[in-house]
Amino acid sequence: MELLKYLAQESAVSGNEENIIDYIKKFANEIINSCEKAQVKEFEKNEIITTYIVNRNMIFIVLEGSADLLRYDFNGNQTIVEKFNKYDVFGEIFYRININNELFVKAREKSKILMF
């Protein structure tokens, strides 16, 4: 889900892209201040951010950098399912998990991720 595009369509956030980005930053700060489990973590290039098997009920927002949702099959073949960029939202709740495949999110570059 591209949060920036979604918010651009919502009546609660109007105006240019800077207004939307300010809204996202305020939203992220509210989450960090009000959620006990919310944290911002930095990941190096190619570092695993999460697997959808381990962190089932978490939501992630890319604050800086980018990441890929990867699927590996039984033969070890890797497929990029989705690419996440700045302000994109991802998490296991957005995907159905097939027991024959495990999904991983890996940093495509040095990234900062809000996790809650």
Image (cartoon, helix red, strand yellow):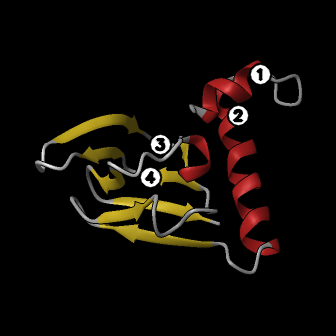
Query: Distance of mark 3 from mark 2, alpha carbons?
Result: 13 Å
Q: What secondary structure is marked by label 1? A: loop
Residue 91 visible somewhere in the drawing: no
The mark closer to the camera, 1 or 4, is 4
* Earlier sequence position, callout 2 versus callout 1: 1
Quadrant assignment for the C terminus:
bottom right
Q: Quadrant of the N terminus?
A: top right
Q: Quadrant of residue 77?
A: top left
Q: For the residues carrying marks 3 and 1, which lies nearer the camera in this image? A: 3
SS state under label 3? loop
The disc, 2 or 4, on the residue closer to the chain's N-terminal end is 2
Q: Position of residue 47 (x, y in %)?
A: 26, 65
Q: Residue furthest top?
A: 9
Kindly report which numbered mark, 3 or 2, lies closer to the viewer in this rendering: 3
Labels 2 & 1 near each other (Cβ < 8 A): yes
Instruction: State yes or no: discs 3 and 2 in contact (Cβ < 8 Å).
Output: no
Q: Vertical placement of 28 versus 70: above or below?
A: below
Kind of residue indicated by mark 3: Lys
Q: CA distance from mark 2 to mark 4?
A: 16 Å
**Which disc number belongs to residue 15?**
1
Name the residue at 27% across, 36% down.
Answer: 80
Which residue: 21% across, 59% down?
A: 46
Please tell me which residue is depicted at 54% across the width and 47% down the height of the picture.
90
Percent x, y of residue 106? 30, 55
Do callouts 4 and 3 mark residues in contact (Cβ within 8 Å)?
yes
